[in-house]
């Protein structure tokens, strides 16, 4: 094989590798990635396992997580209910994200700072409702349901 042929073969292999890497990256969003502007629960600690997006502050508060499942095909816990099954949460928003122990924003809670993630402590496998707010202070029920994002 001549020097010119080897150069073209290597360039072709590099181009094919670039296409394959780009394709794999595009699919990552459907296998557990929490997108900017959203907050997500994860089935396992350390933002691992199946993922369940909450819709972010534009989607408003979730009074009861019953009926929401972890996305299929996103890891351990796929298809399981989110309510009372989340171990960690990721907040890719500019708001504070609250996970409450009880439905309707009652009981103990965890707060995840903007653009951060955390293993749940007070609501570890005991998450029942969510809310967003501008501050890390506990929002009232009215703040959660009456204002966009809390």
Image: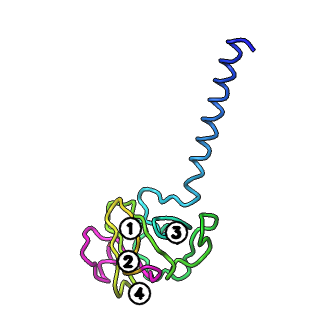
Mark 4–mark 2 CB contact (< 8 Å): no
Q: CA distance from mark 1 to mark 4?
A: 19 Å
Q: CA distance from mark 2 to mark 3?
A: 18 Å
Q: Are marks 1 and 2 in contact (CB under 8 Å)?
A: yes
Q: CA distance from mark 1 to mark 2?
A: 9 Å
Position of residue 23 measured from the top left corner of the image (x, y, whole percent): 62, 44
Between marks 3 and 1 in the image, the one whose residue lies nearer the viewer: 1
Asked which secondary structure carries label 4, the reply is strand
Callout 1 crowding tier (Cα within 10 Å): few <14, some 14–19, many ≥20: some
When the figure is inspected, residue 3 is found, relative to residue 14, above or below; the finding is above
The residue shown at (69%, 18%) is 6
Disc nearer the start of the sequence (1/4): 4
Tell me the quarter of the image containing the N terminus.
top right
Marks 3 and 4 in Cβ contact (< 8 Å): no
Left or right: residue 9 compared with residue 148: right
**Residue where numbered disc 1 is placed:** 118
Instruction: Look at discs 2 and 3 and give the one toward the viewer.
Output: 2
Which mark is first along the chain, 4 or 3?
3
Residue that mark 3 sits on? 52
Are the residues at dot 1 and dot 4 in contact (C-beta closer than 8 Å)? no
Between 75 and 114, the one lying in front of the other is 75
Q: Do the residues bearing badges 3 and 1 touch, measured as CB atoms within 8 Å?
A: no
Give the Cα distance between marks 3 and 4.
18 Å
Whole-angstrom CA distance, mark 4 to mark 2, is: 14 Å
Q: What is the magenta range? A: 124-148
In front of the other: label 4 or label 2? 2
Residue 140: say if magenta: yes
Image label count: 4
* Residue at image mark 2: 121
Q: Is 27 left or right of 144, judged from the image as shown?
A: right
């Amino acid at each position: 094989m001549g020097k010119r042929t080897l150069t073209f073969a290597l360039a072709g292999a590099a181009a094919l590798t670039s296409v394959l890497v780009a394709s794999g990256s595009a699919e990552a969003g459907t296998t557990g990635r929490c997108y900017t502007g959203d907050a997500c629960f994860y089935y396992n600690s350390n933002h691992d396992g199946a993922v369940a997006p909450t819709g972010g502050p534009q989607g408003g508060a979730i009074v009861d997580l019953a009926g929401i499942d972890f996305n299929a095909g996103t890891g351990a816990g796929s298809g399981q209910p989110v309510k009372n099954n989340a171990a960690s949460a990721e907040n890719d928003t500019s708001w504070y994200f609250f996970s409450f122990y009880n439905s309707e924003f009652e009981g103990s809670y965890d707060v995840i700072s903007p653009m951060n993630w955390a293993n749940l402590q007070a609501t570890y496998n005991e998450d029942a409702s969510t809310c967003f707010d501008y501050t890390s202070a506990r929002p009232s029920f009215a703040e959660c349901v009456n204002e966009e994002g809390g």
